[in-house]
Every structure is written in C-alpha cells, then in structure tokens.
C-alpha cells in the first residue's frame, strides 16, 4: 500500500505560476464565471458545477508542483466546515419534505386567509421574525433552517416572490449573526481585538439598527411592488389545521438552540419528531419513506445541487488558502498605512477580502483579527471599533457571496421546500439581501466620515 502524504499545514505556501495572482486566479475565475453565467441565463446549479470544475482545472495548470495538487484537493474536501455543511444540508432537506407532506403549509395558509393577512407585508414580517430568531440564537444557518421550511411555502403560496422572501430570511439571519452576543462572529471579533463581548454588542448596536431599519423599509416597498396576491378558496377547509401540529418542530428547533444544543443535534431530533408526527397523522407510510421518490429521496435530492457545488468550492478555497496571497496583500497594505483612517480602511479591506477568500465571516475575522489589532493599536483606535469593523464588513460580504456557506445553505433549504425550481440559485435572492449590503455601506461610510470613531482614551473613561 502506498504511503499517504500528510495534509499541508496552514502556514505552508505552495508555489504557483504567476505568484500570488496565480494562486488567487482560480477563485477570481470562479466568482467571475458564476456572475457571467447568471447574466447569460445559465441559471441551473449544474452549470455552476462546471464553473467550479473549470477553476479546479486552471488551478492544476498554474501550480508548479503538480504532485501537491491531489493533497490540496483532499484537504479541501476534508475541511470540518464542509462536513458540517453537508450534514446540515441532508438532515434539514429531509425535515423540510416531512413538514411539507405533513400539511404545515396548508395549515398556515388557512390561518393567513382566515385572518386576512395582507400578502404584501409578509416579506417585512418574515424579516422581523428572522431578526428575532437570529438575535436569540446568533446563527444565520439556524435561522434559515427554522424559517425557510415554514415561511417560504406560506409566502409563495399567498403570492410573494420567493427570491424576495429568501432575501428577507437571510437578511434577518445575518442581523443576529453580526450582533448577537452568542454569535461566533461576535465572539471571534471580540476575542481577536481583546475586548469584552458586551462592550462590542453595545457599541455595534447603532450600526445594526441603521442597516436593519433601512432594510425593513425596502422589504415593505418590495413586498407591495412584487407580490401578486392569490385567492385560496380551498384554504378555508378547517381540516388543514391538523398540519399545524408540525409547527412544534421549527419552534422547538429554535428553543433547543437557545438552550445550547448543537445545531445537528437539534435538527436530527426535530426531523425524527416530524416523522413521528406525520406517522401519527397518517401523512407518512412505509412506502412513502423508502420509495425511490419518497421523503428521504426527495429531501436529499433537493439539496444535491448545492451540496456538490459546495464540495467543489471548498476545493477551490483550499487552493487560495495555500497560495499565501492573503499574507502578501496584508504586508503591502500595512506598509502603506499612515493615518488611523487608512488603518481602518485596511482593516475593512482585509475583512472583506478574507470573507471572499474563505466563503464566510468567522474565518475571515480569525484570519485577519491579529493583524487588525496590531495595526489599529498603533493609532490607538478603540478595540470595540476594530471588532465592529471586522465583524460588520466580514458578515456583510459573506452574505453576498454566491459560494458562501450560509448562502448555499439557503439555496438548499429553498430547494427542499419544493417551492422553487432548479433555476433558483444564490443569484436569485442575493439582490434582496439588503441587510448585508447596508452593513457594508454603513461601515464604509463610518470609516470615511468618522461616524462612531473611538479611541483607546475614550474607552478608558
């Protein structure tokens, strides 16, 4: 048996033709190709597979030592985050189908029609509800998992644009991801900038509220602009209320996350609970569970496009990780820094670059946090200010990446409901992710005009 090479270390740099640019080119090519394909109408997730595979082929051509490439790709597939993402895709996909066949959507539609809820305000209501969930749990993915199987079918059935609804869900998810004291990005930003979490949350609140308030206005406007209310005379059948018993699953999912249960534990528990409730109510049978077109097959099949794309993207990201491009860009940026505003601008740039490189906010903060602390310390910029710039710009960027973990998860959850077709991709709802766009705008305006600026001497008072 051949000896297996050990994984490349995080600090090991691999040589590419073209230096840092050559190492970054596969990721640049992926992002550009995804955008071009969307503009040209190649909206199928399988077309995006081809874009990612093209990036992998370019990476192979650019790496100098071709023998290293196999291990780089294996390391990408071995990433713990990828394993977590795929597991989440599969379990939540099955739970979503169970909620659908159990009649939860029918029950909610009955209530909405009976109480005359205007369909046009649903995107705004969904945004606020997701803000509450994410602010309590601190997780975008958890918010998406709890809200999408329930709220997307309800809103679409009543005439709302699915892209706008998913934009409201993920916007609300990132609100808490950025602000909540239990969020991993909040914890990481506070830890890397050597400050207390409660101080970070207090100082960050004004930025989040500004971005959130403007987002709410936009969701209300777009709700009235895009919604085409649908009349559901059949929804007045009281027997559909039986499906509301399944509402306990997403509610319990949120409660369990608040109690500190890990995400997969909570998802699996509530998937089993949903299956039992469907059995009791007569909605699930042996054949429906095991059939080739049954619950499990549908649940896994619905998220397969996003799962394959996610695996390909993690391999592309691994190429970027080992190229050393971030370290080189950081060194050049720091060498050019002369004022505190330049320092803040560099921190903001590195937070966004790290998120674009890693496909998520937490890793970006951990990657650039130490450098940001040392840089801002030279100009006596307050520690909470550095934490806020890192978190706000990393989260804002991550939510707008078509290959970001939470974004791909949202695509998977939407597909699992059966309310969107194969043409529904991240590019469908990213234009409606207003909160992330506004986080970026608010923080860059803050850097440029000095809004919220604070120095170490101010924090000492």
Image (cartoon, helix red, strand yellow):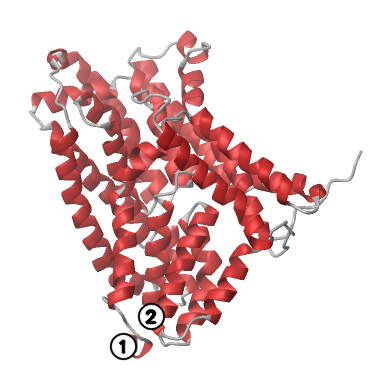
- Helix, strand or loop status at disc 1: helix
239 lies above or below 99: above
Count of residue discs: 2
87 lies above or below 273: below
Q: Position of residue 307 (x, y in %)?
A: 54, 34
Residue highlighted by disc 2 = 341
Q: Quick one: 395 or 352, which is closer to the camera? A: 352
- Residue 64 sits in which quadrant? bottom right
Q: Position of residue 14 (x, y in %)?
A: 74, 59
Residue positioned 27% across, 33% down in the render: 151
Say few, some or many: other residues with alpha carbon within 10 Å of mark 2 (under 14 / 14 to 19 / 20 or more).
some
- Helix, strand or loop status at disc 2: helix
Q: Is 90 left or right of 224, judged from the image as shown?
A: right
Q: Is 332 left or right of 195, judged from the image as shown?
A: right
Residue positioned 44% across, 79% down in the render: 343
Q: Position of residue 227 (x, y in %)?
A: 17, 31
Task: Quote the CA–CA distance across marks 2 and 1.
Answer: 17 Å
| Quadrant in the picture for the N terminus | top right
Residue positioned 74% across, 59% down in the render: 15
Q: Earlier in the sequence, mark 2 or mark 1?
A: 2
């Amino acid at each position: 048996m051949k000896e297996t090479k050990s994984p490349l270390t995080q600090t090991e740099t691999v040589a590419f033709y073209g230096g840092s640019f050559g190492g970054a080119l596969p990721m640049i090519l992926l992002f550009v190709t995804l955008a071009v394909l969307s503009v040209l109408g190649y909206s199928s997730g399988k077309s995006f597979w081809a874009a990612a595979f093209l990036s992998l082929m370019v990476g192979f051509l650019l790496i100098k030592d071709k023998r290293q490439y196999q291990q780089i790709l294996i390391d990408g597939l071995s990433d713990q985050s990828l394993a977590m993402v795929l597991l989440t895709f599969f379990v939540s996909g099955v739970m979503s189908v169970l909620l659908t066949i159990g009649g939860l959507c029918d029950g909610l539609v009955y209530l909405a029609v009976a109480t005359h809820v205007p369909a046009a305000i649903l995107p705004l209501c969904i945004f606020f509800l997701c803000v509450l969930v994410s602010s309590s749990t601190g997780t975008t993915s958890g918010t998406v998992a709890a809200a999408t199987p329930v709220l997307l079918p309800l809103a679409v059935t009543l005439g709302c644009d699915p892209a706008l609804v998913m934009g409201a869900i993920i916007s609300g998810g990132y609100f808490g991801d950025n602000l909540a004291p239990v969020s991993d990005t909040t914890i990481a930003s506070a830890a890397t900038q050597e400050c207390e979490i409660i101080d970070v949350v207090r100082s960050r609140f004004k930025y989040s509220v500004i971005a959130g308030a403007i987002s709410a206005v936009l969701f209300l406007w777009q709700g009235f602009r895009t919604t085409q209310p649908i009349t559901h005379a059949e929804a007045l059948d009281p027997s559909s209320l039986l499906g509301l018993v399944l509402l306990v699953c997403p509610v319990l999912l949120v409660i369990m996350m608040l109690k500190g249960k890990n995400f997969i534990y909570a998802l699996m528990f509530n998937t089993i609970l949903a299956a039992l409730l469907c059995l009791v109510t007569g909605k699930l049978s042996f054949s429906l569970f095991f059939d080739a077109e049954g619950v499990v097959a549908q649940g896994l099949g619905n998220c397969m496009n996003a799962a394959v794309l996610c695996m390909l993207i993690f391999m592309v990201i691994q190429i970027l990780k080992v190229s050393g491009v971030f370290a080189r860009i950081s060194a050049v940026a720091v060498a050019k820094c002369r004022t505190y505003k330049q320092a803040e601008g560099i921190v903001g740039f590195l937070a966004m670059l790290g998120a674009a490189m890693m496909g998520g906010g937490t890793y970006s903060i951990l990657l650039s946090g130490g450098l940001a602390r040392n840089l801002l310390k030279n100009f006596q910029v307050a520690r909470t200010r550095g934490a806020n710039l890192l978190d706000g710009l990393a989260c804002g960027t991550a939510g707008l990446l078509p290959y970001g973990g939470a974004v791909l998860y949202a695509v998977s959850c939407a597909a699992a409901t059966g309310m969107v077709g194969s043409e529904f991709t991240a590019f469908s709802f990213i234009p409606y992710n207003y909160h992330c766009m506004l986080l970026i705008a608010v923080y860059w305006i803050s850097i440029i005009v000095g809004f919220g600026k604070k120095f170490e001497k101010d924090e000492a008072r």
